Amino acid sequence: MQKRIRRRYAAERRFKFMGLAAVVLSAGFLAFLLVTMLSNGLAGFSRTEVALPIDFPAAKLDVTAKQLQNRGADLALAGAGLDEVVDKAATAAFGEQGIDIISDRAWTEVREALKSDPTLLSRKARIDVPVSQDVQNALDGGGKPAMRAIVSGMQAKGLFSNKFDFGFLTSADSTDPTNVGIWGALKGSLFTMLVTLLIAFPIGVLSAVYLEEYAPRNRWTDLIEVSINNLAAVPSIIFGLLGLAVFLSFLNLPRSASLVGGLTLALMIMPVIVIASRNAIKAVPPSIRDAALGVGASKVQVIFHHVLPLALPGILTGTIIGMARALGETAPLLMIGMRAFIAQPPEGLTDPATVLPVQIFLWSDQVSRGFVERTSAAIIVLLVFLLAMNALAIYLRNRFETRW
Amino acid sequence: MTDIQAPAVRTNQTDPAVAAPAQIKMTARDVNVFYGANHAIKDVSIDVDMENVTAFIGPSGCGKSTFLRTLNRMNDTISIAKVTGDITLDGEDIYSSDMDVVQLRARVGMVFQKPNPFPKSIYENVAYGPRIHGLAPARRDMDQIVESALRRAGLWEEVKDRLSDSGTALSGGQQQRLCIARAIAVDPEVILMDEPCSALDPIATAKIEELIHALRGKYAIVIVTHNMQQAARVSQKTAFFHLGHLVEYGETSEIFTNPRQERTKDYITGRYG
Ligand SMILES: Nc1ncnc2c1ncn2[C@@H]1O[C@H](COP(=O)(O)OP(=O)(O)OP(=O)(O)O)[C@@H](O)[C@H]1O
Ligand SMILES: [Mg+2]
């Protein structure tokens, strides 16, 4: 007897230990992922800048301070040859390698500086401009030895500084890693998710309501049930092919558009929403339906006044799981052409767009070293997006949770 | 309909032992109910009086709940249930295609075995029925309906200061009275109660029984109960069901003191059940 009890306690302890080990293991993986992402990726959010002295009066830019405040300032500065002025200033400051030291988009920084402070035109100034990828590589201990020598010399003079790269959050893809931004992909993801939600949520919930509340139980509904369960398990690439066939080939919708991406992903997550919603509806206690019917509520009233509000937390959970899956999905979007190089953030649902995971996939494929950090930074953005979505889900669930 | 509710008939409602002169509210003729192949109710014919409380008694599984649910067509929600025979409310066939089932359930309310308040505020619980039937166009009317329903259910004094609390936060007995208030808020003509006290303690039970006395005469009341004393206390007519048959139906005092059927006697004296 004593022995049996001791054995039982030992088994309990073993079980508890195994559970704890499993939790620790998964937490460890998560921590590893986060640490590597953060250590790599945080650098992706910043950029190195070099202080570039420019003598504006000497450069004789053919623009007036007045022009700089107009809307045509960009055009005026480009026409006045600002990029050449900047290149010359770089050569003057850093020697004949100067042009290679500053980034190709350095002159746009100068342009912005001029626009925000037109008085610069009448004096000498030092403006921080982004460095080129070569310099970045050299600073990281790579690149050509000649460049490394120049860079270490400049470093000793304290010319470099590290700044948060707002450009990364506001611009789109580019061939130059110092120039790329995540905003295009983020906006594409937002548009795509919007379409997915607007299509998949109402259709999924209404299907679930119909199947649970109205559909007769017969061979047809059994067949539909089996198909839905199977659809939820179909690999996403198949949905990509389906989207390609239906939306692009048959309906002739624009290629690479977030509209098509959203529709395709909606097809993919609809079964998930239907299944989750049906379970949530099933879990509403029958006594509540009886109560409502008993005071003379019609079936529609029972569903909309009692069943759906009580099922809402479950429905939302299922929807968010589906949306999170859609947010991270790459394969089906490749099929419908969302892997194109897109240097302009999309303006509308039919503009060519890309999404975060595809952008990550594309950048991770690049040979240039600068893309490694950018890729990690993009992953961080994706994870933050995901986290925000899940936080919203938890908030909504708690908000609508009924306390019994 | 109007002469059935004539006040003159209500004179002896205060004496629970005496059945009032019959004013028939609902009739059932040769009712059969099938759950698939299971023949749950067999050729039951019965008249439910307006002025009396009718008790359904019988051993578990004999079909009391099933029959009660045919009276407001709650069996419609069970897909395998099939009902045959005629049931009328004030002479109208309730299973005819002219009868709107939503309207019917507003006229024939139901209180269930397990208290089942909506997970909403006490006020909302009572106001829900009147609202969906458009009984109270203005907020003030609704307040009045809610208050009078809660008063008639004997719950007002206990909850008047916390009408916005959740109905599910009440005690079991309070919840059941809330359910009764919810049922009478739509001003039904008949109230069906399926073992309303089975989940309650003796004090809460006594409150519900008092309530039934108070409601007698205003509504036709049918109550299913397993408690013989309760049937004797609250009802004037008793129907004994056994294996889907209506074995005996008559004045409660008759059934309990002088049953005509052997099976009724056996059940009442506790020889089976
Ligand atoms: N929803 C249902 N589906 C199938 N059969 C049912 C259903 N409800 C009741 N039955 C069957 O009908 C018969 C009568 O059941 P009913 O619930 O009416 O009995 P009851 O007299 O109310 O019993 P109790 O006193 O235990 O509540 C039983 O044989 C039961 O199995
Ligand atoms: Mg029952």
Image: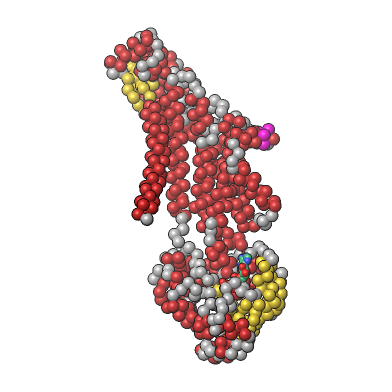
Q: Is residue B255 left or right of residue B83?
A: left
Q: Position of residue B13 (x, y in %)?
A: 53, 88
Q: Evaluate whether residue A198 shows in this view.
A: no
Q: Residue at x 45, y 23 (%)?
A: A371
> Residue A370, located in which quarter of the rendered image?
top left
Instruction: Check the image and name the residue furthest to the left.
Output: A157
Q: Position of residue A112 (x, y in %)?
A: 40, 25
> Residue B243, located in which quarter of the rendered image?
bottom right
Predominant SS along the magenta part: helix
Q: Position of residue A132 (x, y in %)?
A: 41, 18
Which of the image's four quarters has the N terminus of chain B? bottom right
Q: Is residue A387 left or right of residue B247?
A: left
Q: Is residue B201 above or below residue B237?
A: above
Magenta highlight on residue A247: yes
Which of A65 and A381 lies nearest the eye of the viewer?
A381
Q: Is residue B166 left or right of residue B76?
A: left
Q: Is residue A176 above or below residue B159?
A: above
Which of A320 and A102 lies nearest the eye of the viewer?
A320
Q: Residue at x 39, y 48 (%)?
A: A11
Which of the image's four quarters has the C terminus of chain B? bottom right
Which of A283 and A84 lies nearest the eye of the viewer?
A283
> Residue A44, located in which quarter of the rendered image?
top left
What is the span of residues highlighted in magenta in the rendered image?
A245-249
Q: Residue at x 40, y 46 (%)?
A: A15
How does the figure colour the protein chain or chains? Answer: secondary structure
Q: Residue at x 39, y 27 (%)?
A: A40
